[in-house]
Amino acid sequence: MARAYDDLVRRLLRISALRESSALLQWDQETHMPPGGTEARALQLSGLSAFAHELFTAPELGRALAQAEKEETDEKHRALLREVRFAHERATRVPTELVESMSRATSRALSSWTHARAKSDFAAFRPILEEIVQLQRQYAAAIDPDVPPYEVLFKDYEPWIGLDETRRNLAQLRDGLKPLIRRAADAPRPKDVFEGRWPKAQQMAFNVRVLEALGYDFQRGRLDVSAHPFSTGNVHDTRITTRYDESHPLGALLGVIHEFGHSLYTQGLPKEDFGTPLGDARDMAVHESQSRLWENHVGRSRGFWEHWLKPMQDAFPGQLAGATPEDAWRAANIVEPSFIRTEADELTYHMHIALRFEVEEALIAGKANVAEVPALWNERMQAYLGITPPDDAHGCLQDIHWSHGSFGYFPTYSLGSMLSAQLFAAFEKQHGPAAPAIRSGDCAPLRGWLRENVHRHGKRYKTNDLIERATGAPLTPKPFLAYANAKYGELWA
Ligand code: ZN
């Protein structure tokens, strides 16, 4: 008789095939699908997710899991069983009809959000958002009616990090950043040497060059355009997207470097475990640590601009005329309150997250209505950053997450930043300063270290165990605050 473990893995591979297919259809929906395709796509995605849900919650899978738990002693196999048990317990509590309704609603919400954002029309998005919030509350109640719903949802993104621990870390981060953000207001504003004319086609070509130099494997990936940049895929095929602004190249360039960090992680997962949790990324905070490490610790570093300014001047004749690497580095690190999260500097960024964390937790807890979101948003924006968005496109309509039904996701961005600094500090402790290699365009040591300490482990270890193995300590905001104080101390000296 086949071992229960092998039977379980065989089932997981089928489910993974369905989920990967859904991810590819979602990628298509955000990049190439004609607008008329929405209804059909909603049906395809809800069908696939319902089918995957049925397979994952099937009694046969439950029996194979329970049997394997009795038989397996191998540590790696036990790690897989731990992950499957966690997800299976949750999934079996959610009715398939609810999974289908959630998938249908989010597919429709995507096109509704795209139109609402383009016209800055929150009222047009409001009904579907109300539906999604209701579905999320039902989903949380189905999984665990005794725990606050937001906490249940958060576990979808961070199964092994506590929400209380997250709250503490984020409060410490916010409090540590406030004095720096205040100082930024008094610091002389450097000239933004990137202001100019940046044709889209040339930006695309240049960003591809940067991706190649950083080590992105185009044999297993591609770069496209979407309304909201993202990366998706698996170890064999990892795709990234970006969006372009012809008056300023940094949003797209740093965005591409950010998504590169995500896909380098995916491309570095263990191929032999493809399709099982051991071959999957360790959740959102670790994923985001990879993107932020490349975006901020590399892309916004002095060494990066010492290397890339000249090629950029050559690729865009007439732009950046007379600028020095020092000018570019300063311009890439301007700290000032702004409306759009994805374009925020690395300090005020965390105030954008604090705001979303508060608004979405209130919505899910039933302490605020969807209709109140624009007012609540603008009020928090004023409190945290002292500015009020001119319209909802620059306010509560800017992010795609809620239309995806992703509530509980935002806090993981700040956790990811913290972790990126923690990992980068651990790398430098072992290898010495990274700047000389970055300046010479050689990112191989950093890539190798991340692969060895993070990528190749998939979900083998629980999050804090993975972090401790790599850095010697559990997740903490201290290295990020030390990094920010040192860097901006130098910039504003
Ligand atoms: Zn990201």
Image (spheres, rainbow, N blue to C red):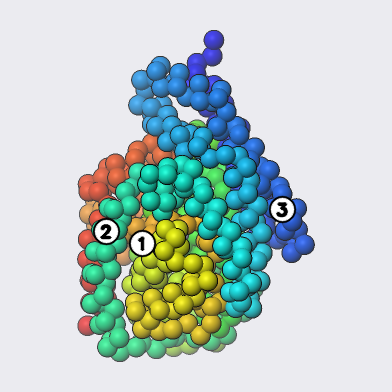
The residue to which callout 1 is attached is 414
Q: CA distance from mark 3 to mark 1?
A: 32 Å
How would you rate the neighbour count of disc 1 (Cα within 10 Å): few for under 14, some for 14-19, many for 20 or more?
A: many
Label 1 close to label 2 by CB (< 8 Å): yes
User: At numbered mark 2, what does the secondary structure look like: helix, strand or loop?
Assistant: helix
Left or right of 357 in this view: 31? right
Q: Residue at x 37, y 22 (%)?
A: 74
- Foreground mark, 3 or 1, reads 3
- Residue 379, given in percent of the width and then of the height, sits at 40, 79
The residue to which callout 3 is attached is 41
- N-terminal of the pair, mark 3 or mark 2, is 3
Disc 1 marks a residue whose amino acid type is: Ser
Q: Quadrant of the N terminus?
A: top right
- N-terminal of the pair, mark 1 or mark 2, is 2
Label 3 close to label 2 by CB (< 8 Å): no
Nearer to me, 380 or 273: 380
Nearer to me, 425 or 181: 181
- N-terminal of the pair, mark 3 or mark 1, is 3
35 over 457 or under it: above or below:
below
Q: Is residue 332 visible?
A: no
280 over 310 or under it: above or below:
above
Disc 2 marks a residue whose amino acid type is: Asn
The residue to which callout 2 is attached is 169
Q: CA distance from mark 3 to mark 2?
A: 39 Å
Left or right of 118 in this view: 330? left
- Residue 57, given in percent of the width and then of the height, sits at 55, 32
Disc 3 marks a residue whose amino acid type is: Arg
- Residue 303, given in percent of the width and then of the height, sits at 35, 69
User: At numbered mark 1, what does the secondary structure look like: helix, strand or loop?
Assistant: helix
- Residue 257, given in percent of the width and then of the height, sits at 47, 63
Q: Residue at x 63, y 46 (%)?
A: 100
User: At numbered mark 3, what does the secondary structure look like: helix, strand or loop?
Assistant: helix
